[in-house]
Image: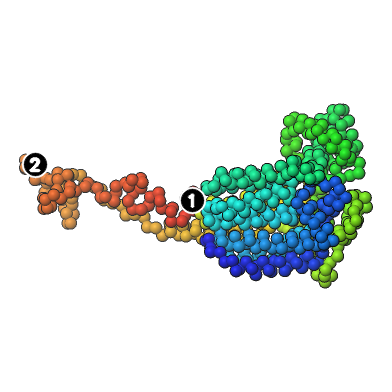
């Protein structure tokens, strides 16, 4: 496994096959799958007021499709094309980096057959374009690893994709921050520019939301939407430790919802039973948001372990490979398979608007629907949850793949391919609302595509280890050298006898000194040394037989750090 020259022509059939399969999903579930959030994306842009609770960019795309075409199928078809391009780009980048060609291509072509990829790509969620951008970020990082340097084009690509991450999800700027910090530790070139690009990409969505969008009549997110996870922490604390709350605290909570609602909503896995119920007043929660946030801060200071445990529980989708089937909200949420908006959302649940019928299932091909629907339904079975729908497992696969790839290729930059995976995992772990698979979709897609890199890297490391052991076993021990003769002491003769030693009365000049030329040597000859030159240490501190400190330059595992630092 080594870095390979790019073959652009291979990407064309790969892209076309992925696109063809995703187009079948699009025709089977036209105009796309949706949830309550999907209806909200469009309803407030039509009825008003336009708010930035969700992605303003994605809301604008839905509104544009609705007003120009009268439907939403254009958005989901564009998603399939972008997903096909992102998967193809990551596959090609991994092959350039050194992943096995044929297995990587086959995995990329088979991925859209899996419901987590196919059905997700045709769902009206802002998480779909967010995931597409994350996959592309991994591809750019793979190109950087193949070159072992950050170039201007790759820096521009990262800047655009990082900015898009922040525009498609409210917590995207946190993903960008973690990913950039990880890359700064790994790369050795253009660090300052990378930091500036990451800072700009993370700050731009915040500036737009709070300063620019209000100038165009787009209201800032509701306070309850911003602080809803903190309200969930209060509910869990009230259910588990009601003694921590004073009468004044309870009176404050009652202005927002009955104490029974706070109690029932106090499950650590999700905040949905708290804020998405009729007796929880969003207007009152917005009005008392500052006071509720002060209560949360007090709990954080007095009982930090309790708040941390609650966040770890709610962020289980990011670190726990299996769901908790016996806890309220502990199971993974995948899709809402409802025929229209009313059957899922219900009447009067969201602001109604003319044309709401677009949120209804109208397959372009009922034959494809009859194939895709049972295929998707069967994949939702609990026994497949850990491998199909939980991103935590595939995040760990990604880390193992880049670690073995870096070791096999002796290239520290390979670790950067998983930077966006780490960014999303840590962000979801710290602040998320429920066990939704879509929050960790990109680690699933990136992790699956890195399986060939994982297998190839593991194989190369094993082969290198076996060869090293074989060389060590075949190496003969060095023969012992005879002791050096002392100056003036005659060496044994070939017959094993010792020649006569001159008498002490003989002339002193009969025994040559250790530093004088031999009697028969020509004039000007150098004095003989007492020891062989092979025994003299070199300037590197190693003996002259070549077994010194530079031996690992030949490609052993010890060369991993130096190869990366050489850039």
Within 10 Å of disc 1 (Cα), the crowding (few <14, some 14-19, many 20+) is few
Q: Residue at x 77, y 49 (%)?
A: 56
Judged from the image, the secondary structure of the residue bearing numbered disc 2 is helix
**Residue 400 at x, y = what percent?**
61, 53
Q: Is residue 510 left or right of residue 325?
A: left
Q: Which residue is mark 2?
A: 508
Q: Residue at x 86, y 58 (%)?
A: 359
Q: Quadrant of residue 387?
A: bottom right
Of the image marks 2 and 1, the number of the one nearer the N terminus: 2
Q: Is residue 534 visible?
A: yes
**Residue lying at 64% horizontally and 68% vertically, measured from the top left:** 12
Image side of residue 563 versus residue 10, left or right: left
Q: Is residue 323 visible?
A: no
Q: Position of residue 11 (x, y in %)?
A: 62, 66
Q: Which mark is residue 390?
A: none
Residue 145 spot, x, y in % from top left: 55, 54
Question: How many numbered marks, from 0 up?
Answer: 2
Residue 567 tag number: 1
Q: 152 or 257, which lies in front?
A: 152
Placement of 508 over or under 493, stated as above or below: above
């Amino acid at each position: 496994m080594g870095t390979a020259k790019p073959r652009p022509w291979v990407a064309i059939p790969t892209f076309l096959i992925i696109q063809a399969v995703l187009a079948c999903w699009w025709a089977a579930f036209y105009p796309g799958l949706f949830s309550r959030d999907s209806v909200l994306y469009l309803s407030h842009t039509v009825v008003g007021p336009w708010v930035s609770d969700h992605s303003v960019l994605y809301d604008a795309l839905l509104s544009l499709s609705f007003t120009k075409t009268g439907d939403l199928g254009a958005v989901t078809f564009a998603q399939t094309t972008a997903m096909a391009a992102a998967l193809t780009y990551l596959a090609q980048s991994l092959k350039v980096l050194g992943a096995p060609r044929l297995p990587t291509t086959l995995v990329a072509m088979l991925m859209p057959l899996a419901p987590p990829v196919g059905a997700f790509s045709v769902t009206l969620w802002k998480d779909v374009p967010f995931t597409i951008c994350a996959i592309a970020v991994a591809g750019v990082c793979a190109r950087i690893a193949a070159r072992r340097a950050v170039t201007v084009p790759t820096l521009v690509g990262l800047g655009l994709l990082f900015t898009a991450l922040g525009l498609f999800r409210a917590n995207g700027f946190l993903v960008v921050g973690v990913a950039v910090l990880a890359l700064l530790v790994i790369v050795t070139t253009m660090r300052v520019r990378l930091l500036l690009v990451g800072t700009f990409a993370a700050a731009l969505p915040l500036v737009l939301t709070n300063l620019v969008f209000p100038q165009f009549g787009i209201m800032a997110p509701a306070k309850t939407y911003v602080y809803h996870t903190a309200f969930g922490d209060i509910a869990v604390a009230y259910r588990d430790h009601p003694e921590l709350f004073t009468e004044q605290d309870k009176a404050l909570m009652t202005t927002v919802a009955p104490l029974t609602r706070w109690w029932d909503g106090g499950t650590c896995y999700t905040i949905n039973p708290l804020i998405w119920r009729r007796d929880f007043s969003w207007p009152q929660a917005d009005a008392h948001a500052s006071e509720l946030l002060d209560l949360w801060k007090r709990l954080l200071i007095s009982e930090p372990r309790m708040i941390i445990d609650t966040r770890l529980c709610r962020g289980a989708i990011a670190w726990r490979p299996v769901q908790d089937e016996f806890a309220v909200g502990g199971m993974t949420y995948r899709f809402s398979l409802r025929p229209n908006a009313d059957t899922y959302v219900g009447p009067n649940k969201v602001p109604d608007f003319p044309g709401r019928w677009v949120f209804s299932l109208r397959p372009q091909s009922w034959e494809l629907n009859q194939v895709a629907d049972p295929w998707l339904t069967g994949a939702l079975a609990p026994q497949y949850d850990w491998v199909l729908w939980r991103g935590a497992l595939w995040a760990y696969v990604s880390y193992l793949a880049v670690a073995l790839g870096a070791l096999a290729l002796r290239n520290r930059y390979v670790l950067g391919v998983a930077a966006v995976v780490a960014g999303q995992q840590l962000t979801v772990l710290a602040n998320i609302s429920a066990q939704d698979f879509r929050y960790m979709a990109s680690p699933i897609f990136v992790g699956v595509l890195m399986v060939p890199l994982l297998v190839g890297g593991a194989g190369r490391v094993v082969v290198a280890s076996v060869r090293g052991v074989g060389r060590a076993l075949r190496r003969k021990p060095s023969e012992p050298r005879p002791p050096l003769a002392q100056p003036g002491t005659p060496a044994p003769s070939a017959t094993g006898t010792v020649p006569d030693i001159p008498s002490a009365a003989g002339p002193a000049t009969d025994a040559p000194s250790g530093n004088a030329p031999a009697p028969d040597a020509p004039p000007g000859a150098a004095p003989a040394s007492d020891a062989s030159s092979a025994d003299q240490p070199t300037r590197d501190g190693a003996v002259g037989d070549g077994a010194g400190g530079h031996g690992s330059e030949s490609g052993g595992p010890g060369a991993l750090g130096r190869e990366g630092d050489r850039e």
